[in-house]
Image (cartoon, rainbow, N blue to C red):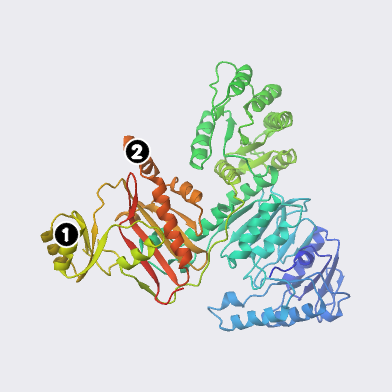
Amino acid sequence: MTRELSRLLKPRSIAVIGGGAWCRAVVAQCQKMGFEGKIWPVHPSAGTFSGLKVFPDVDALPAPPDAAFIGVNRAATIDIAGQLARGGAGGAVCFASGFLEAQAEDAQGVDHQAALLQAADDMPILGPNCYGFINFLDGALLWPDQHGGKRVERGVAIVTQSSNIAINLTMQARALPLAYVITAGNQAQCGLSDIGMAVLQDPRVTALGLHIEGIGDLRKFEALARYAQSLGKRIVAIKVGQSAQAQQATISHTASLAGRDAGAAALLRRLGIARVTDLPTFLETLKLLHVAGPLESNRIATISCSGGEASLAADTGTAAGLDFPPLGARQKTTLRDVLGPRVALANPLDYHTYIWRDVPAMTAAFAGMADPGIAITLLIVDFPRSDRCDPSDWDCVIEAVIAASQQTGARYGMVATLPELMPEHVADMLMAQGITPFCGLNEALMACAHAALPVESDVDPVHVAAPATAPVLLAEGDAKDLLAEHGLRCPVSRRCEGSAQAASAAEEIGFPVALKGAGIAHKTEAGAVRLNLTCGDDVAAAAAAMPVDSYLVEEMITDSIAELLIGVVHDPAHGFILTVGAGGTSAELLDDTVSLLVPARRDAILTAIGRLRMAPILAGYRGRPPAQMDRILDAVMAVQDFVLAHARGLQEVEINPLLCTRDDAIAADALLRRDVEKD
């Protein structure tokens, strides 16, 4: 259920319930921001709050408030939430802690949260254990502390589960206009997806930033991503709080390689949500999306008057996945006319300082660098500190980039390599002209890479299923039989008891053969696998040396070009994680994998495999024959088809190695764990 939050987030009347310093701060912040609606303090004995009449209780209010800040202890919070709900209030912020987030220290936290939800009923609540929100568009603050923001007409919205991070983000001096900053607390009722949907509905919001500790409802989160896409608005996320449940199964290589974070990373990538790893890049990416919107490609150009800066931009940008296309004939002609013969023309461009202070020449150079095939042109400019230097000599570059932007209609950004060397008043000036002011070179280039992230419109919902309750490890032969029913190619094999039967089976299959001990997950480490056996006596001797009496004898695949791993593990937080990568006994050592979520499209799997470091080997490295990619994809799809057909109670499935040859892809080993009672 998605609740209507617009009345809470865009209130015309605010009740502040409680008498402490936190509640007085809410009133003061609303007054300071120039909130034009009604502010109704509520306290049984206080006389006035900041010159406002104080009401003794909720029932004494002149009308149901659109929004209420409940700043009392947890027991009283529950009672007051009930009164507000019964009276028709639009919603409330629950400031108190000691609810579900405190269950490890306080067993009553769970009960208090249940009571709060029952009391609130259909009335929306934020929190508990949250600071509330700031609406910088309308000057409405249910916020019990200082902040560093100001009123804006349009801007980005940020939703976070951390109140302290929210405070810090309001203090940014990067000229990023904040429309909303909202804290979700422990998300008892309204989660990140509910809040995100509500703020995206506001046409004044240009992009959405999420600080995520955990995604509670996958379907709501998918709906949020689809809704943002339908509006042409992008989402940027910092995902922390790795899920411990994702590594419940650690028998397979896949569970180790996928790690605790692979599901979240795959989900965000699947939904076209840019994932960043630090707050500065988070803010700079949102800034770019606010000013310029999404970029059509990862092709950029940079201009500076320093060869060192040009090289740094090239190295940093290339590492971020950006492309610096070579200059075209028109660009070269224009730039040569302006810069003369002594400047080497390239992208990134070091234009030296020959034309510094010549605004028409600088304008012509900046305009000449822009090109329809370039998504954005970045000028690298660090401004001198104004307390010890005179920055007026840099006015020429500001004037020139604004003129070039107006002349060409192209996207421009100005980047200070050091964040503190982009003055906020300069950033404001540039932003007013549609030029993105970036604080930090690395952050700027990463922002460009994230803003160029492609978004697919026809992504299927993530497949979810009940987790395994008592998973067992199936015998390899049984696992292969089940997977073969879905099209997985497996070697010819025989299951045997005793060394004599194993030798006889090898004669039937034909040499060379592989001999494996049955019932062991990691056979190599246990001494339970022997390869390239060429006679019956060798098979019998190898069997006798193994720590088991049951065996699997298989045909030996001898013309392998590469070994891959295909694995799927169940992650309660994100569905099924599909991992493809370098396989064999060194899979974890090589750590060359990509992860997607089930179901994954065949073309998405092909693209993901192309990101592997070993992809050149599969394509035919240094004259060697290529692997048969269609058969590799067939194998991956067969494993996925099995997962979709047998998802209930499935814990993990792994093919390692998948032997890739010129014309086939064959599962040499298979591991499968699931509940005995399935489907």
Question: What amino acid type is highlighted by mark number 1?
Answer: Glu
Given residues 187 and 596, the one toward you in this image is 596
On the image, the x and y values in percent for residue 240 come to 53, 61
Q: Which residue is depicted at the point 75% across and 66% down? A: 5
On the image, the x and y values in percent for residue 18 come to 76, 76
Quadrant in the picture for residue 19: bottom right
Task: Residue 624: give its label.
Answer: none
How far is the residue under mark 1 from the one under mark 2? 36 Å
Given residues 111 and 230, the one toward you in this image is 230
**Residue that mark 2 sits on:** 621
Q: Please indicate, yes or no, whether residue 174 appears anywhere in the rendered image.
A: no
In this rendering, the answer to whether 587 lies above or below 406 is below
Q: Which residue is depicted at the point 70% across and 24% down? A: 359
On the image, the x and y values in percent for residue 664 come to 34, 49
Task: Residue 507: give its label.
Answer: 1
Disc 1 packing (10 Å; few <14; some 14–19; many ≥20): some
Q: In the structure shown, which secondary structural element does the residue marked by tag 2 occupy?
A: helix
